[in-house]
Amino acid sequence: MMIRFCPGRKREKSNALTRFLKTNHVEYELIRQDELLTRGTRLYGAAEEPVIEIDGKIFVNPNPQAIRKLLAADPAAEI
């Protein structure tokens, strides 16, 4: 499972997601905003909100419970 994380300008939400990923020992790759924009997709709110990409699916401003459900569906991921 490939997880890429792009923090937004809203520090509280980005810090909460970073804490969630670290406390649950989820391996992720930190990417910059310009790397996300080179994918050719237009994302509403991507500059302000944190963005997580899980296996090619992009989620803008996800909550930790949604990420937990997505990772629980993958048998290779441990939570």
Image (cartoon, grey):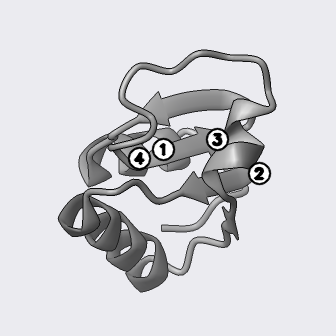
> Callout 4: helix, strand or loop?
helix
> Callout 3: helix, strand or loop?
strand
**Residue 63 x, y percent position in the rendering:** 26, 46
> Callout 2: helix, strand or loop?
loop
Q: Is residue 31 above or below residue 58?
A: below
Disc 3 + disc 2, Cβ < 8 Å: yes
**Residue 17 x, y percent position in the rendering:** 35, 64
Q: Amino acid at mark 1?
A: Val
* Residue density around tag 1, few if under 14, some if 14–19, many if 20 or more, within 10 Å: many
Q: CA distance from mark 3 to mark 2?
A: 6 Å
Disc 1 + disc 3, Cβ < 8 Å: no
**Residue 79 x, y percent position in the rendering:** 48, 67
Q: Residue at x 30, y 73 (%)?
A: 15
Q: Is residue 72 left or right of residue 20?
A: right
Q: CA distance from mark 4 to mark 1?
A: 12 Å
Question: Which residue corresponds to mark 2?
Answer: 2
Disc 3 + disc 4, Cβ < 8 Å: yes
Q: Earlier in the sequence, mark 3 or mark 2?
A: 2
**Residue 75 x, y percent position in the rendering:** 67, 49
* Residue density around tag 3, few if under 14, some if 14–19, many if 20 or more, within 10 Å: some
* Residue density around tag 4, few if under 14, some if 14–19, many if 20 or more, within 10 Å: some
* Residue density around tag 2, few if under 14, some if 14–19, many if 20 or more, within 10 Å: few
Q: CA distance from mark 1 to mark 2?
A: 14 Å
Q: Earlier in the sequence, mark 1 or mark 2?
A: 2
Q: Amino acid at mark 2?
A: Met
Q: Earlier in the sequence, mark 4 or mark 1?
A: 1
Question: Which residue corresponds to mark 1?
Answer: 51
* Image mark for residue 67: 4
User: Which sits in the foreground, 12 or 59?
Assistant: 12
User: Which sits in the foreground, 42 or 70?
Assistant: 42
Q: Residue at x 34, y 63 (%)?
A: 14
Question: Which residue corresponds to mark 3?
Answer: 54
